[in-house]
Image (cartoon, grey):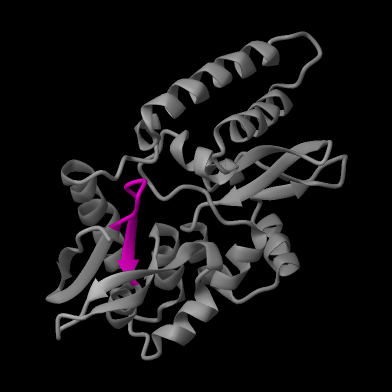
Amino acid sequence: MSATMPFAFENQHVRIQLDESGAPWFVASDVCAILGYSNPSKAITDHVEEDDLTKREVIDTLGRNQMTNHINESGVYCLVFGSKMKKARKFKRWVTHDVLPTIRQTGHYAAPGSLAALPSPTQDQVQALLLMGEAVAKVPGVKHGIAMAATLTCISENTGLAVETLRRALPANDEPICALNATQLGKLIGKSPKATNQLLAQHGMQLRNDRDEWELTDDGQQWAEAMPYSRNGHSGYQILWNPAVADLLAEVA
């Protein structure tokens, strides 16, 4: 168990631990208390994806080791957007501008825009394969996005890293990364995936292309990324949205 790092937001404690890769995990009950959730278990069930939740040991007030729900950065943002508290947005800013930069400077949490989040041997493998992917993308007749999708798959197969882990390590971006698909985004604003896609289209962020697939518009590129993928012999793009777009959609919905 890593040491618990205590932070305080407006005199309320937020406990954080770093996992084996140096990524921060927040004690879920601390975050829920700040955001006004009276029932942390229900809040987690309603708003947090399974991949964003884990059990980790903490020492309680009696000195006992207890297994407690922890949520990662993405889980924190989901609770923020589901909160009705006026200070939720202020809390989000505190996390992104104070807590995470402090951890990056004093702990082992690497910024999402750096391959330093990966062990050195793995960094070398990833960088070598990326160079190969860029070379393949320059071959006449090969689409760049498809080549890079295949490269990500190749990296995953050779390093054992999940594609999502690679995606979090590679983009050069200090803001919350684009990580939500239409289903996850819909949960934040209380709409189905279909309704969410239609709402995004109504506000000029995406459109249906000739292949009857959703494609980002110029406006949409400010809020999302079209991530290439290669799966079961099929390659294409998946649109992933920045959590911040939920605020915009909630205001105009």
Q: For residue 20: magenta?
A: yes
Q: Quadrant of residue 196?
A: bottom right
The answer, for residue 70, to whether it is visible in the render is yes
Q: What is the tally of numbered marks visible in this picture?
A: 0
Whether residue 219 is visible to the viewer of this picture, yes or no, is no
Return the x and y of residue 204 as percentages of the image width and height: 66, 51
Camera-side residue: 127 or 83?
A: 127
| Image coords of residue 216 (percent x, y) | 67, 43
Residue lying furthest left in this view?
Answer: 11
Q: Quadrant of residue 221?
A: top right
Residue 66 versus residue 21 in the image, above or below: below
Q: Position of residue 42 (x, y in %)?
A: 48, 86
Say whether residue 68 is left or right of residue 103.
right
Quarter of the image containing the C terminus?
bottom right
Find the residue positioned furthest to the right: 211
Residue drawn at 16 percent across, 45 percent down: 106
* Residue 64 higher or lower than 102, as above or below: below
Q: Is residue 115 rendered to the left or right of residue 211?
A: left
- Is 62 or 124 nearer to us in this picture? 62
Q: Residue furthest bottom?
A: 38
Q: Residue at x 51, y 58 (%)?
A: 245
Q: Is residue 113 left or right of residue 5?
A: right
Q: Residue at x 20, y 60 (%)?
A: 3
Instruction: Find out whether residue 46 is within the magenta segment.
Output: no
Image quadrant of residue 217? Answer: top right
Q: Position of residue 147 (x, y in %)?
A: 70, 23
Establish if 70 lies above or below 130.
below
Q: Quadrant of the N terminus?
A: bottom left
Start-end of magenta stretch: 18-27
Residue occupying image coordinates x 52% and y 48%? 178
